[in-house]
Image (cartoon, grey):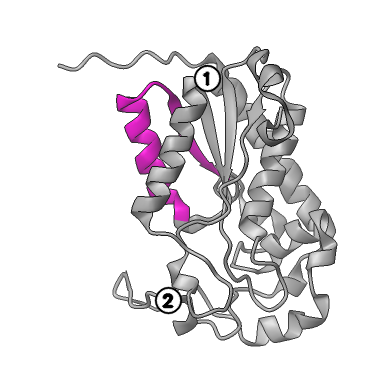
Amino acid sequence: MHLSETTWTDADAAETDLALLPTGSTEQHGPHAPMGTDALSAETIAADAADAYDGEVVVAPPVNVGISEEHRHFTGSLWVSEDTFRSYVGETIESLGSHGWERIVVVNGHGGNTDALREVCGAITRDGDAYAVPWTWFDALEFDGYGVELGHGGPAETAVVEAVRPDLVHEDRFGDAAAGAGDGFGQFHRGTNLAYDFAEFSDSGNVGDPGDGDAELGERLLADATAALVDLLGTIADRDLSRPVHR
């Protein structure tokens, strides 16, 4: 059940306490991939998992703008502060819980959101009326098994978009993307990252060669991520939500 597509009366009749909240970003992914890549991947996996799960699951509308200020030099990238993101996601989770959907998985597609999501889900679980966990799809997969690295706008993320919305991928720009790509996520020295902005280490805005992936790879990634989320939903559905007694 997708809340944005249903009526309140049908939502009221839903017999479930499970909900999914997709989160992503609107940020550059190189000259070849759409800025909505992260939100698209999270929304797709959430929808596929809800369909595949043996039971009813409520799917909330995606949070499309995340913690992405590091991409500010690339036109069109949008961002909010960590405080704003935590507040928005937290209050959305609380509203889901108020309707009885108290077991919530935040399905995340953007690495920059992960720390804030862990914090807000922990706070709500400890002090609120819902149990919430963050789940980032690419952290659930072992990329060595696919022969590629995750990158940013690289072969994995681009492949996912090619599998879902190939019309949004500019394959003729793969060469430019690879030529200007960064070698990694930052400039590291003695264990610390010296760079705060993506433009400091990537001219094209991406990390990795998008040409190393294709739609077939994207379908495998989506299928495996969906299966992992379905398995997680089963665990969350059976979890004892009582909290430890404070000593």
Image coordinates of residue 55 in percent, x first then y, are 71, 17
From the viewer's perspective, is the residue at label 1 or at label 2 nearer? 1
Specify the farthest residue to the front.
8
Image coordinates of residue 162 in percent, x first then y, are 80, 61
Secondary structure mostly seen in magenta is helix
**For the point 72% across and 75% down, which residue is it?**
32
* Residue 185 seen in this snapshot: no
Q: Is residue 129 above or below residue 65?
A: above
Is the C terminus in the top left, top right, bottom left or bottom right quadrant?
top left
- Asked whether 234 or 55 is in front, the reply is 55
Q: Label 2, on which residue?
A: 197
**Classed neighbour count for the residue bearing mark 1: other residues with Cα under 10 Å, few (<14), some (14–19), many (≥20):** few
Q: Which residues are magenta?
A: 113-136
**For the point 61% across and 86% down, which residue is it?**
180
* Numbered-mark total: 2
User: In screen coordinates, is 85 left or right of 178?
Assistant: left
Disc marking residue 178:
none
* Residue 39 seen in this snapshot: yes
User: In screen coordinates, is 144 left or right of 244?
Assistant: right
Q: Amino acid at mark 2?
A: Asp
**For the point 71% across and 70% down, which residue is it?**
33
Question: How far apart in space, not on screen, are marks 1 and 2 (Cα)?
Answer: 40 Å
Q: Label 1, on which residue?
A: 99
Image coordinates of residue 1 in percent, x first then y, are 71, 27
Specify the farthest residue to the left.
247
Q: Earlier in the sequence, mark 1 or mark 2?
A: 1
- Asked whether 144 or 31 is in front, the reply is 31
Image coordinates of residue 131 in percent, x first then y, are 44, 25
Report helix, strand or loop for mark 1. loop
**Classed neighbour count for the residue bearing mark 2: other residues with Cα under 10 Å, few (<14), some (14–19), many (≥20):** some
**For the point 48% across and 82% down, which residue is it?**
199
Q: Amino acid at mark 1?
A: His
